[in-house]
Image (cartoon, rainbow, N blue to C red):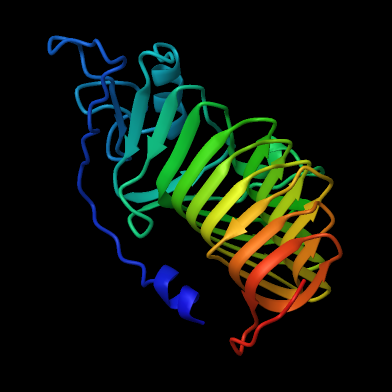
């Protein structure tokens, strides 16, 4: 369980303001260019003032109104628990950064009747990134409970812990038809009927240093990949109470630990090992 010890750590929290690192768009930007700064602190009001924003979505929307490919914005979230009542929709050319996985926690009770953005804490957007924070979605109603929902967009997710619990189906990351990248991510899903650490359809995402854990009384999957093109998984750990890996998408799995059964008729696997560090094949 070497990988797991590298990823998981105790949770501790601070309470202090954090100022965004300015970003200047374009290689020809002069020293006099205004810094692209938006930041969030829950101690502030929900309207912009000298201290910034107290609402995550409001800050993202304000940045998106001015952001472009030559002028990206960064929204940085101060330490604290942020209780959400609706899905956070990311925006193009706006990068959202917390103050650390153990410091900035986005928590919610969000679920829905379908696998969609309205059942998730985060809905992705192309030309955006999310990092250095934790996501907790613990739902007490609804069929589907999701951490990150990504449909047809290209997002970069790094240094994020995801914990999802639902009364029917829980999904840490749902990715459909995208080329996103996930690095240094831990995703744990617990559902009474189905649970997926990561669930992909028609995606060509890349996972590096990821722990994906799905636990359910009935069907738990570390990762489930359906329909080509392929997913690439490197240096990761997949854990499932039923299947560590279920794959019909010709995925490439390298240097990865699989804890649970494997159902992967067409995956290309190399340097794969089980819970006892014995070599296994796909």
- Looking at the picture, how far across and down is residue 209, in whole percent? 49, 61
Q: Nearer the viewer, residue 279 or 8?
A: 279
Q: Nearer the viewer, residue 6 or 241?
A: 6
Residue 137 higher or lower than 153, as above or below: below
At x 35%, y 60%, the residue is: 102
Q: Which quadrant holds residue 253?
A: bottom right
- For residue 79, say whether it is visible: yes
Q: Is residue 41 left or right of residue 183?
A: left
- Looking at the picture, how far across and down is residue 8, in whole percent? 43, 71
- Looking at the picture, how far across and down is residue 186, in whole percent? 52, 61
At x 45%, y 18%, the residue is: 64
Name the quadrant of the C terminus: bottom right
Q: Nearer the viewer, residue 204 or 213?
A: 204
Residue 92 higher or lower than 98, as above or below: above
- Looking at the picture, how far across and down is residue 243, in whole percent? 77, 72
- For residue 140, say whether it is visible: no
């Amino acid at each position: 369980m070497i990988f797991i010890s590298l990823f998981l750590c105790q949770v501790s929290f601070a309470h202090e303001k954090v100022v965004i690192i300015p970003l200047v768009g374009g290689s020809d930007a002069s020293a006099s260019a205004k810094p692209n700064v938006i930041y969030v602190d829950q101690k502030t009001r929900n309207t912009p003032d000298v201290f910034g924003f107290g609402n995550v979505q409001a800050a993202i929307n304000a940045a998106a109104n001015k952001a472009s490919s030559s002028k990206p914005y960064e929204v940085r979230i101060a330490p604290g628990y942020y209780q959400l009542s609706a899905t956070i929709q990311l925006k193009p050319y706006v990068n959202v950064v917390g103050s650390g996985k153990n410091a900035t926690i986005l928590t919610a009770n969000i679920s829905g009747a379908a696998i969609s953005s309205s059942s998730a804490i985060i809905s992705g957007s192309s030309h955006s990134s999310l990092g250095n924070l934790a996501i907790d979605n613990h739902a007490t109603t609804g069929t589907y409970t999701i951490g990150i929902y990504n449909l047809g967009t290209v997002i970069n997710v790094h240094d994020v812990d995801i914990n999802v619990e639902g009364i029917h189906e829980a999904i840490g990351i749902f990715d459909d038809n995208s080329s996103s990248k996930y690095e240094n991510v831990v995703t744990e899903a617990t559902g009474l009927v189905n649970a997926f650490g990561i669930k992909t359809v028609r995606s060509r995402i890349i996972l590096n240093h990821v722990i994906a854990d799905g636990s359910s009384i009935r069907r738990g999957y570390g990762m489930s990949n359906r329909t080509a093109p392929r997913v690439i998984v490197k240096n990761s750990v997949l854990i499932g109470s039923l299947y560590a890996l279920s794959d019909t998408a010709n995925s490439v799995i390298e240097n990865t630990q699989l804890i649970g059964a494997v159902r992967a008729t067409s995956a290309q696997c190399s340097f794969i090992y089980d819970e006892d560090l014995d070599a296994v094949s796909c």
